[in-house]
Amino acid sequence: MIALNTVLILLAAFLGAFWQSAFQGIYRLLGAQIDLLPALIVYASLSSGLPTITLTALLGGLFVDSLSANPLGVSVLPLLIVGLVFYSKRDLILRDQLFAQCVLGFIASAVVPALTVLLILTKGHSPLLGWGSLWQWTVMSAAGAVATPVWFGLFGLFDRALNYSRSAETTFRPDREIRRGRR
């Protein structure tokens, strides 16, 4: 499932980048565009290895930047930083808990845009920043908190549908000898 999981995560990154640039209904409704990639990075960092996190950050960041006004590649480093931080602490995180997924999605969706804006400012570009940016940042963070459990549920569904379930180990071994009698 490792290779299939990586392919499914990369496919989700591609489809998520396409969805957020092609469908503007949420932008018109809320006045802010949501970003699904930080939530996907949270799932990848808690469920996969370093190659999957790196590929998701690299390709997902390039997918999003190629369809947005960002300089190409500026989203890669923030996604990778968030993925590596969560990966390094994944033994301490209760990844199956809904509350933990929401909090991690909120944190990732708040940190990635902030680091991206910082990198854009560092490169000498001048993004449009104002009071509306605070609203967009809040909506993006809340959407990431909602999207993270959705990614976990979707990939859990794929895992149950496409993988063998582990059989429960019993204490009875079929090859053991049962002695009968008094002795």
Image (cartoon, helix red, strand yellow):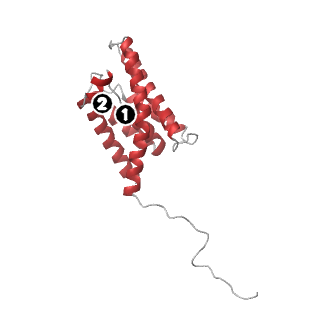
The residue depicted at 37 percent of the width and 57 percent of the height is: 162
Hey, which quadrant is residue 60 in on the image?
A: top left
Task: Say what amino acid the circle numbered 2 marks.
Answer: Val
- Which one is nearer the viewer's eye here, 21 or 10? 21
Give the x, y percent position of residue 44.
43, 41
Mark 2 lies on residue: 64
* Image quarter hosting the N terminus: bottom left
Q: Which mark is residue 37?
A: 1
Name, please, the residue furthest toward the left.
Answer: 22
Hey, which quadrant is residue 25 in on the image?
A: top left
- Within 10 angstroms of label 2, few (less than 14), some, or many (20 or more) residues? many
Disc 2 is placed on an element classified as: helix
The residue depicted at 46 percent of the width and 45 percent of the height is: 47
The residue depicted at 68 percent of the width and 85 percent of the height is: 179
Task: Calculate the distance from the C-alpha at mark 1 to the C-alpha at mark 2.
Answer: 9 Å
Marks 1/2 in contact by CB < 8 Å: the verdict is: yes
- Which one is nearer the viewer's eye here, 67 or 172? 172
The residue depicted at 28 percent of the width and 39 percent of the height is: 15
- Within 10 angstroms of label 1, few (less than 14), some, or many (20 or more) residues? many
Hey, which quadrant is residue 164 in on the image?
A: bottom left
Give the x, y percent position of residue 120.
36, 18
Give the x, y percent position of residue 41.
42, 36
Task: Say what amino acid the circle numbered 1 marks.
Answer: Leu
Query: Which numbered disc, 1 or 2, marks the residue that appears first in the sequence?
Result: 1
